[in-house]
Amino acid sequence: MLTLVTGSRGRVGSALVTLLHRDGHGVRAGSRNPGELPLPGGVPSVLCDLGDPGTFAAALEGVDAVFLYAEPSHVDEFLTAAQTAGVAHIVLLSSSSVLDPDPGANPIAASHHAVEQALIASPLTTTLLRPGAFAGNAYQWSESIRSGRPVELPYPNSGTSPIDEADIAEAARAVLTDIRLRGTAYHLTGPESLTAAEQVGLLAAASGSSAAFRTVSRAAWKDAVSPFVPEEIAEGLLDHWAATDGAAAEVTGETEKLTGRPARTFAAWAADHAAAFRA
């Protein structure tokens, strides 16, 4: 069986390529810049730009399964090309944000929801992975923690159950290689609910930093991130944090169900990546 991994430059995609190759499964790494991928020896790369339907046919030739990122712009063309190529199974990296009561109104959930709906309507066997917040989202605080400055949080008591991207890759490997796990949706979380403030504390402790946090207004936070976060995305994040302020995040057993072991803790992630937060 040959699996095409789209988005192979990302943390989840790159880890999945390595896992599949290590275990002896056929894998092809897709990216809009395939020549720049740091791949294990023997793994072929291919141009696969989910924003360019002209790249789909060649990337999918001979492919049995696909690990797909949630890019809605040309999903119908991608699914048509996948059916033509004889693809039997697609695993979508979606988001737990689609579980919101009205995902179409949430700018973060909307793109994932649109791709999910297209896949559900297609004849292809589809498995949906719906992780919550990635542990790697904490990199946004790295500059402040390295310099010992307070991390600015608009809702420091907002709860999430951050999941290590390595666990998402292992879950994807499981559903791609075990036919018994296909054709359903999995809500993936880390093993515990943590507030944003608690995550900052764990990162500071792991890196030996004196950094703490300070609470800022919605407007101040949105202004600070405006150079690199679109306004509608910033508003979506702020609304989500406001809705979860003071509430524990859901913790599921789906990650352990797929990987066969407990999900990695955020403290372990912080220890493994402490160098990025150390002065």
Image: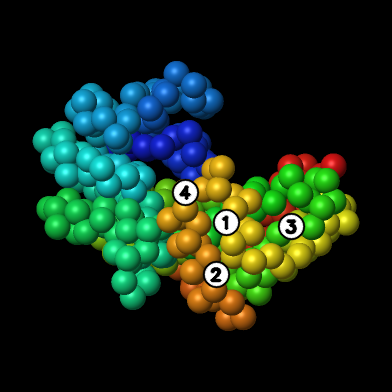
Q: Amino acid at mark 1?
A: Lys
Among the two numbered marks 2 and 1 on one chain, the one whose residue lies closer to the N terminus: 1
Task: Name the residue rendered at 44%, 35% in the picture.
Answer: 8
What's the distance in space between the residues labelled 3 and 4, CA to CA?
20 Å
Task: Name the residue rendered at 50%, 57% in the picture.
Answer: 234
Task: Name the residue rendered at 49%, 25% in the picture.
Answer: 37
- Foreground: 5 or 132? 132
Residue 123, which numbered label? none
- Mark 1 or mark 3, whichever is nearer to me: 1
Mark 1: which secondary structure? Answer: helix
- Foreground: 214 or 118? 214
- Mark 3 or mark 4, whichever is nearer to me: 4
- Vertical placement of 124 versus 189: above or below? above
Among the two numbered marks 4 and 1 on one chain, the one whose residue lies closer to the N terminus: 1
What's the distance in space between the residues labelled 1 and 3, CA to CA?
14 Å
Task: Name the residue rendered at 37%, 58% in the picture.
Answer: 107
Residue 230, which numbered label? 4
Residue annotated with mark 1? 222
What's the distance in space between the residues labelled 2 and 3, CA to CA?
16 Å
Residue annotated with mark 2? 241
Q: x and y percent of residue 211 in the render?
A: 83, 57
